[in-house]
Image: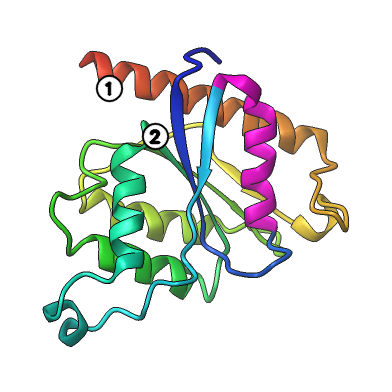
Amino acid sequence: MSSSSLKILAISGSLRESSFNSAALKTAEEIAGDSARFTFADLSGIPLYDQDLRDKGIPEAVEALQQQVLEADAILFSTPEYNYSVSGVLKNAIDWLSRVDPQPFADKPVAVMSASMSAFGGARAQYDLRRSLIYLDAHFVNKPEVMISFAHKKFDDSGALTDEDTRKFIGDLLKALVEWQQRLSAGTSD
């Protein structure tokens, strides 16, 4: 990877302290090393979306997340799969951000990975996340796809990723995200 000034905002769809998705994002930061600066979004303070609340103004936690997305060069999501879709906390954050101006995801390079204890590795959640963000004009890295199946067998108790193939897949995704960001910023998306 190149571009030491690349700012990546990492957004986990899980609030769980020992989340495999948060651990996957920490692994991405470790793999990137000095080639990118990671910031980790905190979705825990975002209230449930409610138009009545929205009519009173944008909550501070939403404004802070909006600013983080706007300041990032690229976004890296890692989402669990809940009932064949994204987690409520992640969908709620996206719903709030869909109501702000300027729209922070517009023209933003985005990559997605997922981790799940199931054999599918969160694949269905990834497609729901993509669908929501396409409406907001995000630009996705299409390949490689990183779906960490049987995550409970690939991370140790400290949250370290022990599966070397998965580490390689995450590295490949980061490389693709950096290249995609560079192409978009240069005005060449083909």
**Image point (31%, 67%), residue name:** 60
The crowding category of the residue bearing disc 2, from other C-alpha atoms within 10 Å (few below 14, some 14 to 19, many at least 20), is many
Q: How many labels does the image show?
A: 2
Q: What residue type is labelled 2?
A: Ala
Which is more N-terminal, label 2 or label 1? 2
Name the residue that disc number 2 marks. 74
How would you classify the magenta stretch by its main secondary structure? helix
- Give the label, 1 or 2, closer to the camera: 2
Specify start and end residues of the magenta stretch as a single range. 20-35
Is residue 32 one of those drawn in magenta? yes
Q: In which quarter of the image is the N terminus?
A: top right
Is residue 52 one of those drawn in magenta? no
Q: Is 90 drawn above or below residue 134 in the view shown?
A: below
The crowding category of the residue bearing disc 1, from other C-alpha atoms within 10 Å (few below 14, some 14 to 19, many at least 20), is some
Q: Which amino acid does label 1 sit on?
A: Leu
Name the residue that disc number 1 marks. 184
Q: Report, in whole angstroms, how far the alpha carbon at label 1 lies from the one at label 2.
A: 10 Å
Residue 144: where, in percent of width, then height? Answer: 53, 32
